[in-house]
Image (cartoon, grey):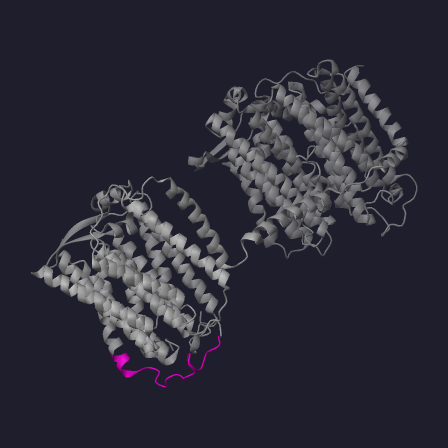
Amino acid sequence: MTLLLIVLLPLLGALVPLMARNLPRGRLAWLTAVAPAIALGIAVFHLGDVFAGQTPQFHLPWISELGLDLALRFDGLSALFVLLILGIGLLIILYSRYYLSGEDSLARLYSFLMLFMTAMIGIVMADNLLLMWVFWELTSLTSFLLIGYWYQLSEARKGARMALTVTGAGGLALLAGILVIGHIVGSYQFDDVLAAADQIRSSELYPVVLVLVLLGAFTKSAQFPFQFWLPHAMSAPTPVSAFLHSATMVKAGVFLLARMHPILSGTDLWFYIVSFTGLATLLYGAWFALMKQDLKGVLAFSTISHLGLITLLFGFNSQMAAVAGLLHIINHATFKASLFMAAGIVDHECGTRDIRKLNGLYRYMPHTTILAMVASASMAGVPLLNGFLSKEMFFAESLDAQLLGGLSWLIPALATLGGILSVAYSLRFIHDVFFNGEPKDLPKTPHEPPRYMKLPIEILVLICLLVGILPSLVIKDLLVSASASVLAGPVPEFSLAIWHGFNVPLMMSGIALAGGVGVYALRHHLYSFQRQFRARNALLVFEANIQRLVNLAERSMDSFENGSLQRYMLWLLLTALLFVGIGLLAVPQLSGEFEQQPFDAMLLTGAVITGLAGLGTAITHRKRIVSLLMLSVVGLMTSLAFARFAAPDLALTQLAVEVVTMILLMLALFFLPQRTPKESSARRIMRDVLLASAFGVVIASLNFAILTRPVESISDFFMANAVSGGGGHNVVNVILVDFRGFDTLGEITVLGIAGLAIFKLLNRLRLFMPSSDLDGRSWSPDRHPMILATVSQTLLPLALLVSVYIFLRGHNEPGGGFIAGLVTAVAIILLYIARGVDWTQRWLRFPYQPVAAAGVLIAGLTGAGSWMFGYPFLTSSFGHFTIPVIGEIELATALLFDLGVYLTVVGATLMILANLGKLTTPHRPTKEKS
Amino acid sequence: MLDIALWISIALFAASLMLNVFRLAIGPDLPDRILAVDTMYVNSIALIVLFGIQLNSKAYFEAALLIAMLGFVSTVAVCKYLLRGDIIE
């Protein structure tokens, strides 16, 4: 349980700065630091168990069906990273308080930092690969927020976007890799995967897994050729860079390598991919670190270089190399964080980061200079500092790498070259900035920063020295337990001494130091050499590519989606025509084996009328009201056809929908121009007529072909199970409220939302009201004819009775909530028509929105109710009850569900129709009323 | 006997439906057309009831009931449109 707290505390801590944002900065910083400090305390408390070789674990089932559980572990590797993340995170909190200027919101930065910290801790403590991936994506998202903290700067926005794109794409690859692992192993629990390591390595999918997982790791830790995002992430505030590029973000990539080391390493493929990528990154980063003129740019590329070094070590496939990699993770985090913070101080106090302007700062800030010198010497690998230890181990391991056969000597040679460059840029960082003459036109006069701004650097530099001088005392336990989890077995004996006697690694260190000084002395020749290459700004290249992609997408969208309904219909119909047409061509004979029904004069009459009315609708479409009358004939004939062919449910629904549509269209027609101009060209009409005819022919043939053949469908199941499973004799209704109840729930929700949306759209809408009809006659002065009002009022109770009747018997005979709802709504609309809004409002004083909402709620709760009895959502139950006098009746929970449908339909229909009708009256929807 | 009577009635109502369509098509005015549609509703009720008798089923009764009620509402709505343009005011 306490393990969960380590993750949860920073998450809750993200709220602290937001709530305390009005406090003075000092107090804000302290309050923010409380949660991670407690989490760090818990982590330290568990260290004893970890050193003793135990692995505290925490397991809470989450979405176990998908293999995703809230599973945490705290092994040596997790412990190492948690200490780094929380420890350096706390120092960053202190540092940011002084770094950030008064205009920037410290609370926002803190909040993002805490979220990011949570995500990082989640990655390193996850005991489930899917859970790890979730946190992995969270780091991409939160780092996007952090890098883009100064969102008013275009550079920051673009840098953030690039980092998100690259690491996000890598995250997708990682997810794919994890899913393949899950496919091989059958579980995402880390212990299960670890136990199946041999199975994964021998699987034929191993190369796929390896490449996908490595893509994730390499994009995250900015390995060549994905290194380009990292330098542009430097547009973040320096504390963020110090955190992201020392202990966290980019370390997530090497963490993944370490985590997957016992599972995926040990093969030649691993060696070739990982070590060559690492080597290329090491040299690439080191070279450009030497060339950069921006202080943070130097650090950015040196970060890339050191990440390459760590990757290279993990690629060596040797146990000692992995230990060295872990040691360098710690060392790099400490010296790089302090260097970034020192660079931030320089930037803060001088107002520039350009190395060409910064010179001789020693005289202005001696204290900071000394701190930076120590950290920088550690980066260069000077003895008595922690960087020296890992670099020695790195050189020793490079000598042992034999996989290149006769060319294996190249690896130590290139490693030494990397060492030389590393010494050169470290020297440059110190000499160019703090010595080497006088500063040139700085925007500010530099001076020492506030006392506590240096404290984080002092602590980190102290760690550098302690680890460098007393390695076995300070770091050995942590390193051994972390190595144990990376190697998943016994850790080889190693000594963390400074002095191993005169040997080849020492000689390589010597060469690196001496060579580095030499290279630095000759740096101006190198600069002029580098100037021959055209500098490529990765940001511009990336943005250009993204823009090209967006333009391409937009162009292809525009060519399809131009907003014309006719165009969409054309594509839709053509596509359907094509596929159905091809299918029909393949059928040998149109009619199937079924005997056809006798064809009588009545059917012919119906078909002719429907066809004529359909044609009439199209022909008279420019006289809207006539067209509408024709359309209503089509609807009437359709429902007659439904009735004739024994589908009374459909007939009822069709009739009700028909009337509601008519009223809706007439309400809208009033606001539209009475005459439509002739718009279509003859060619276009020709095209549409041809298309419509072709479509009609094909669909008619298709229907004929299907109806004359025996078709296996699920309707037999519904027929057979309606009574036994749903307790109703009306199969249609049982399907609606029981078998497919979930669909119905979705549909009524959509209906309710549509009603609300229309209500919102009509809000305060004022439209032009024509004062005369089509032929210029003015409107009749009689607004509410007496006869109509009287008849309508008489009809209302009858209509309500009918709707109750239809509703109640719906489960066993034609009817149901939907039809009943429409009938009720139509009856109320009739009142509106006959009596006007004023009168109706006076008698019906309830608003329709709550009715629709209540309907959805009732249906949803009915479904949820079955949970209480331990059944799945929307399981209906029914029973037969005997009530005195009335006799035996059947009650089903489906009836309650149907009530929800009924209320939603009434509410939504009235919300749409009545509000549309009210547009011309003072009762129109307004914000004040809603 | 009943069969023959049914067939004759159905044929007559079908013929009147055709005549309604004819009136709907030629107009000449909107009230003519509205009357044509309203008469179609009435004739449809008769047809549906006749179907019900022919197939000896009660299920058609509701459809007839609904047509009677809803047909009235839509005729009223169209007439109101003709009178005032604005059907709900």
Say which residue appears at 71% left-offset and 38% top-offset.
A228
Q: Look at the image and say whether residue A868 sits in the magenta stretch.
A: no
Q: At x 86% / y 24%, what residue is drawn?
A: A514
Q: Position of residue A250 (x, y in %)?
A: 66, 36
Asked if residue A725 lies left or right of residue A275, the reply is left
The front one of A636 and A29 is A636
Percent across and percent down for residue A73 are 53, 31
Residue farthest bottom in this picture = A781
| Residue, far right | A437
Quadrant in which the C terminus of chain A is drawn: bottom left
Viewer-side residue, A908 vs A775:
A775
Residue at 71% x, 42% y is A241
- Find the residue positioned furthest to the top: A406
Residue found at x 83% / y 21%:
A510
Depth check: give the residue in front, A320 or A37: A320
Report x, y in % for residue A57. 50, 30
Say whether residue A441 is left or right of residue A153. Answer: right
Point out the stretch of residues depicted in magenta: A767-790
Q: Tell me how many marks there are.
A: 0
* Visible residue check, residue A382: no
- Residue A103 lies, with reference to residue A44, above or below; the image says below
Task: Please identify the quarter of the rendering in which residue A134 is found.
Answer: top right
Q: Position of residue A307 (x, y in %)?
A: 70, 31
The answer to which image quadrant residue A118 occupies is top right
Q: Is residue A578 above or below residue A678?
A: above
Does A714 sit left or right of A775 as displayed? left
Res A23 visible: yes
Q: Main secondary structure of the magenta part?
A: loop
